[in-house]
Amino acid sequence: MLTEKDLTIPDAVDVYEKLSVDELRIIAFKDTGTDPRMAEDLTAAAHADGRSVLLELADMSDAGQERGYQLALDLGVDRVVGAWRPEVAQAFAGSGKPEYWPFVGSLSGSPLVLSSTPDELAAEAELLSGTDGVRGLVLMPYRQSSYDPVLLMERTAAAASVPFLIAGGVRRDAAQIAAIAAAGAWGFTMGGAALADRHDDPESVTERVSEILRLCREAPGAH
């Protein structure tokens, strides 16, 4: 994910164009910190390379979500992540629309923080994953400190009938990546942990992404 602290990095297109990792299949960025022209260029570049594009809507205000969903349609991204909205699920249910992956749980602040209990997450995961137009769910178990993140992932996995993605707080840590894989997550996003040294060492992004993908391949139960 070409983001830091819930903002798309200003040099996202340049960083992407210098990235040399054939195995990488998905590029992601956020509505916050970007502008339409940069978003268009980044989406077009990723699609030209045969990759899919995920847009995460970090502006959780009503107006921000509305702008973000329109941006997703205008760009033609493959997946859009945002707040749960029944009308969005209905609008995105048709063919040719981005896949709708709503957040599970109550989120607030910037960066976003999760405040739901395991029972609340399980109930919402069951409800949303059974709703027409919802193609996946997004969980932020590492953006809270009240519960074991593994417990939150396991409860979500048990209740959901669609794939779920882990976002926020994922590091270059073999044990953490293995736990995410073991819980049955479809994948995870990682921003700042992969981009931290890009200004001093532009090649570091390729090196870090390659290392992360290696950890994914080696994680028990990875798919």
Image: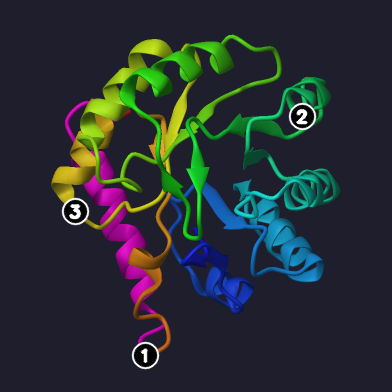
Q: How is the image coloured?
A: rainbow
- CB under 8 Å between callouts 3 and 1? no
Going by the picture, which residue comes out furthest to the left?
175
Residue 148 in percent (x, y) is at 20, 35
The disc label shown at residue 97, or none: none
Left or right of 22? Residue 144 is left
Given the image, on which type of amino acid does mark 3 rest? Asp
| Location of residue 150 (image quadrant) | top left
Q: Position of residue 176 (x, y in %)?
A: 20, 44
Q: Is residue 32 above or below residue 129?
A: below
The magenta stretch spans which residues?
201-222
| Mark 2 surroundings: few (<14), some (14-19) or many (≥20) residues within 10 A | some
Magenta-drawn stretch, dominant element (helix, strand or loop): helix
Q: Is residue 100 left or right of residue 117?
A: right
State the separation of the CA atoms marked 3 and 2.
Answer: 35 Å
Mark 3 vs mark 2: which is more N-terminal? 2
Q: Which residue is mark 1?
A: 200
Residue receiving disc 2: 88
Q: Secondary structure at mark 2?
A: helix
Residue carrying label 3: 173
* Residue 170 seen in render: yes
Callout 1 touching callout 2 (CB < 8 Å): no
The location of residue 44, given as percent across then percent down, is 74, 58
Mark 1, secondary structure of its residue: loop
Tell me which corner region of the image, top left, top right, bottom left or bottom right, holds residue 59. Answer: bottom right
Which residue is drawn at the image coordinates 59% and 72% (left, top)?
12
First reached walking from the N terminus: tag 1 or tag 2: 2
> Three-letter amino acid code at disc 2?
Val
Q: How many marks?
A: 3
What's under tag 1, amino acid-wise?
A: Asp
